[in-house]
Image (spheres, rainbow, N blue to C red):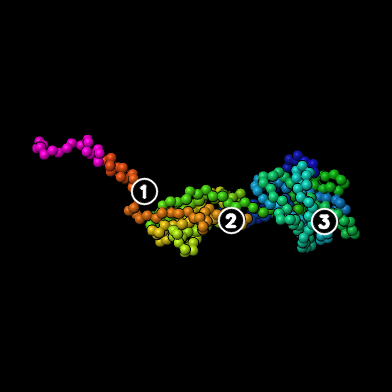
């Protein structure tokens, strides 16, 4: 397919996740890209070997194309096929055929090998539909007449042409495949009986759904207890998550903990784990870690030396 330079105002509909959810919103997986209002208002009739295509501009992230769906006025599934081309007219995948339909109007689903393809920061790609058999009933692909994005094309005479009067209804289903990343300096000390605060910076290309802290006493066989961390600042794509281990669980035995996060695509990633947790030494209020004790000893020693060498000594004489 020839590259076309078209200056257009594009209204993107990302069904499922248009913007990262705020802390009070439930995270919804982003699963579909569409450039129409999702309902056919008319149909474009296709003859044998006619094709149509929609150009997709994926986000600059790592994703998998896992499915394609479209609207049509026929459910003759053996008569149509789709494939994907890159922006230089190269085939990304072999043709695939429908697996299911519902309607009318018929919503037709395609799934290839799982996934259809995986991409990271790729340029535009095209989903192409072809009508491959002629019979008495023509095949019509659904058209959204209310909007025009400049992304729909037809090939009914051997050459590709921009379809100027609406949007051809073809949607791309996308899955997130990369789990969250952590930025966290493990804690070393806690005070017995005091709440232990833990914060962690978690990032994810599509958004974090939840962050969980697991903890128990040091070297314990007791199952880990869990605490759900809250998004304290930033966004679900890059934010600080915060929580506390209750003081009654911060005992002299010490603490072991680890963290895991789940993103909106249900990918999980761990920071530490049950077999290799982070270890926290618990001290009493009047105790100090070793480095603190050393500082105090050095200070006392220095004061004693100053007192001995520089302050006047009382030798028993009368002082008038």
Q: Say which of 238 and 223 sits in front.
A: 223
In the rendering, which numbered label is found on residue 290? 1
- Crowd tier of the residue under label 1, counting other residues whose Cα lies within 10 Å: few below 14, some 14–19, many 20 or above: few
Q: Which residue is mark 3?
A: 80
Q: Which residue is mark 2?
A: 268
**Reading the chain from its start, which is encountered first: label 3 or label 2?**
3
Label 1 vs label 2, nearer the camera: 1
Q: Image point 45% across, 59% down: which residue?
A: 219
Quarter of the image with the N terminus in it: top right
State yes or no: residue 317 in magenta: yes
Of helix, strand and loop, which one carries label 2? Answer: strand
State yes or no: residue 273 in magenta: no
Question: Percent from the top left, x then y, of residue 180?
Answer: 58, 51
Q: Residue furthest right?
A: 136
Residue 30 occupies quadrant: bottom right
Question: Percent from the top left, x then y, of residue 34?
Answer: 71, 52
- Crowd tier of the residue under label 3, counting other residues whose Cα lies within 10 Å: few below 14, some 14–19, many 20 or above: many
Whether residue 301 is visible to the viewer of this picture, yes or no, is: yes
Q: Say which of 225 and 21 sits in front.
A: 225
Of helix, strand and loop, which one carries label 3? Answer: strand
- Crowd tier of the residue under label 2, counting other residues whose Cα lies within 10 Å: few below 14, some 14–19, many 20 or above: some
Q: Image point 43% across, 54% down: which residue?
A: 280
The magenta segment: 304-320
Q: Residue furthest bottom?
A: 222
In whole angstroms, how far apart are the C-alphas of marks 3 and 1? 74 Å
Whether residue 145 is visible to the viewer of this picture, yes or no, is: no
With respect to residue 205, does 320 lie above or below?
above
Question: Percent from the top left, x then y, of residue 86?
Answer: 75, 45
């Amino acid at each position: 397919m020839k590259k076309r330079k078209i200056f257009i105002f594009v209204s993107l509909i990302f069904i499922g996740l248009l913007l990262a959810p705020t802390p009070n919103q439930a995270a919804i997986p982003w699963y579909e890209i569409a450039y129409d209002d999702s309902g056919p208002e008319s149909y474009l009739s296709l003859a044998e070997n006619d094709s149509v295509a929609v150009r997709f501009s994926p986000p600059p992230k790592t994703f998998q194309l896992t499915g394609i769906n479209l609207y049509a006025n026929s459910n003759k599934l053996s008569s149509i096929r789709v494939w994907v081309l890159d922006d230089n007219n190269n085939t990304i995948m072999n043709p695939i055929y429908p697996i299911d339909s519902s309607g009318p109007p018929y919503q037709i689903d395609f799934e290839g090998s799982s996934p259809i393809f995986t991409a990271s920061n790729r340029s535009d790609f095209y989903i192409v539909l072809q009508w491959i058999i002629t019979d008495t009933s023509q095949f019509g692909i659904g058209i959204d007449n209310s909007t025009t994005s400049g992304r729909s094309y037809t090939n009914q005479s051997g050459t590709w042409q921009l379809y100027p009067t609406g949007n051809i209804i073809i949607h791309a289903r996308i899955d997130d495949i990369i789990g969250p990343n952590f930025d966290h300096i493990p804690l070393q000390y806690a005070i017995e009986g005091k709440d232990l605060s833990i914060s962690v910076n978690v990032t994810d290309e599509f958004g974090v759904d939840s962050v969980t802290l697991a903890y128990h006493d040091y070297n314990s066989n007791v199952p880990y207890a869990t605490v759900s961390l809250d998004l304290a600042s930033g966004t679900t794509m890059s934010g600080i998550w915060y929580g506390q281990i209750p003081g009654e669980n911060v005992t002299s035995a010490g603490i072991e903990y680890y963290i895991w996060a789940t993103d909106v695509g249900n990918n999980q990633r761990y920071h530490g784990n049950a077999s290799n947790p982070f270890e926290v030494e618990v001290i009493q209020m009047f105790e100090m870690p070793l480095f603190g004790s050393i500082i105090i000893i050095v200070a006392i020693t220095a004061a004693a030396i100053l007192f001995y060498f520089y302050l006047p000594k009382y030798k028993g004489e009368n002082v008038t």
